[in-house]
Image (spheres, helix red, strand yellow):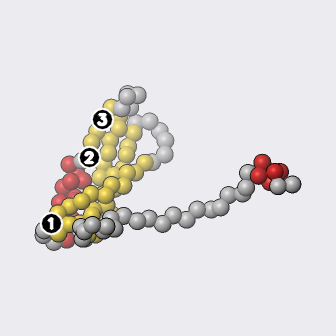
Amino acid sequence: MQAYVAQIIYKIKSSSKGTEQYDEQYRLVFAADEREALNKAQIIGKEEEAAFIDRHGRAVSWQMVAIKDLQEVVLNDGSLLFSTVKEVEPIAAPLWAESASC
């Protein structure tokens, strides 16, 4: 068996109006090959779909959109499982920082 990380995307629908929400989940799947891993990830994704009424009485549902990514991983001590790079826009210094330097 080989280990794979599947990235599963869910759309969160709510009866209240608002912005669209999505949930990205990373799931560990053990399979003999990539095809079996993809099939297992799709089954897991469908099994985790849910519909419920939240504490405010709104209907909420989680619907699987897709398996976005599937990567084989080697599970050793110190293995990299996830990494992300984010670019941010620098913000101006706060007003009090500018006046303090005068």
Q: Indicate which label's residue lies in the foreground, 1 or 3.
A: 1
Name the kind of residue labelled 1 in the image. Ala
Inter-mark Cα distance, 2 to 1? 22 Å
Name the kind of residue labelled 3 in the image. Phe
Checking the image for residue 46, the label placed there is none
Q: Which residue is mark 3?
A: 52
From the viewer's perspective, is 83 left or right of 33? Answer: right
Check the image and report above or below for 65 versus 36: above
Name the kind of residue labelled 2 in the image. Glu
Q: Which residue is mark 2?
A: 49
Q: Which residue is mark 1?
A: 31
Q: Indicate which label's residue lies in the foreground, 2 or 1.
A: 1
From the viewer's perspective, is 67 left or right of 16? Answer: left
Residue 8, horizontal then vertical, whole percent: 30, 57
Residue 51, horizontal then vertical, whole percent: 28, 39
Other residues around mark 1 within 10 Å, as few (<14) / some (14–19) / many (≥20): some
